[in-house]
Image (spheres, helix red, strand yellow):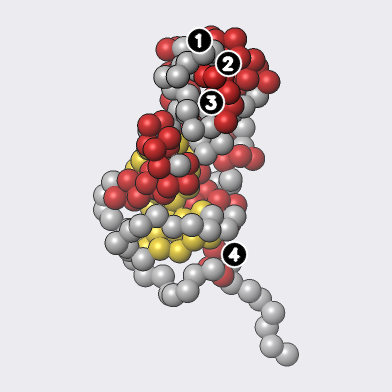
Amino acid sequence: MPSTRRSPPEQLALAWEVHGRVAGVDEAGRGPLAGPVVAAAVILDASRPVKGLADSKVLTAQRRQELDAQIRDRACAVAIGEASVQEIDNLNILQATLLAMRRAVEALRPAPDLVLVDGNRLPVLTIPAEAIVRGDATVAAISAASVLAKVHRDRLCEELDRAWPAYGFALHKGYPTTAHLEALARHGACPAHRRSYAPVRAALFGAGAP
């Protein structure tokens, strides 16, 4: 009787056999109304595994911070890429996200031989790459990248909160919560807000800004 055993999920989507260093890439911050979009790239060290990796969205903030420290300590290489609010407004959020991913990959030292990206779109790279839907839940390197990207962006939002405390960035991380929308309506947009997003445009119009 033939075996019904299947390969691990992270191998099912690959179109070629993997050799050498494999980098996982993921982003954080596509949905928020403010702040940059962040991407992380990670090459894990098989001899120093990080236990408990998962999609960052299912982890508590404390657990993400613990894993962030472990990943940075044990990985072969990690890198962060950002695309600014101005780039988001000029390019659109998808193209800005792909730009942040490319910057993260290009910053890796040593460079990877293969890049695995969460989702169904790839940045322009000179390295072979594969897009994997739900990769943040099935591929360890992508899970690690999702954690690093989320922790890095949350820290940026804490900095935004110190600069513009009226908006509550430390609490909602820029997402369009009721409290954030109320603050936008009350105070208008600050320099950290993405002008190309509809709620921010509405706040600017309501505040009488050009």
* Mark toward the start of the polypeptide (3 vs 4): 4
The kind of residue tagged 2 is Gly
Residue at the left extreme?
Answer: 110
Q: CA distance from mark 1 to mark 3?
A: 20 Å
At mark 3, the secondary structure is helix
* Mark toward the start of the polypeptide (2 vs 1): 1
Quadrant holding the N terminus: bottom right
Q: CA distance from mark 2 to mark 3?
A: 8 Å
Q: CA distance from mark 4 to mark 2?
A: 49 Å
Tell me residue 53's x, y (percent): 55, 46
Res. 201 mark = 3
Q: Residue at x 64, y 40 (%)?
A: 58
Q: Nearer the viewer, mark 4 or mark 2?
A: 2
Q: Around disc 2, counting alpha carbons within 10 Å, would you say few (fewer than 14), some (14 to 19), or many (20 or more)?
A: some
The kind of residue tagged 4 is Pro
Q: Is residue 76 left or right of residue 13?
A: left
Q: Which residue is mark 1?
A: 165
The one nearer the camera, 37 or 153, is 37
Q: Residue at x 59, y 55 (%)?
A: 134
Residue 15 visible in the displayed image:
yes
Work out whether 114 lies above or below 17.
above
Q: Which residue is mark 4?
A: 9
Q: Which residue is mark 2?
A: 206
Q: Nearer the viewer, mark 4 or mark 1?
A: 1
At mark 2, the secondary structure is helix
The kind of residue tagged 1 is Pro
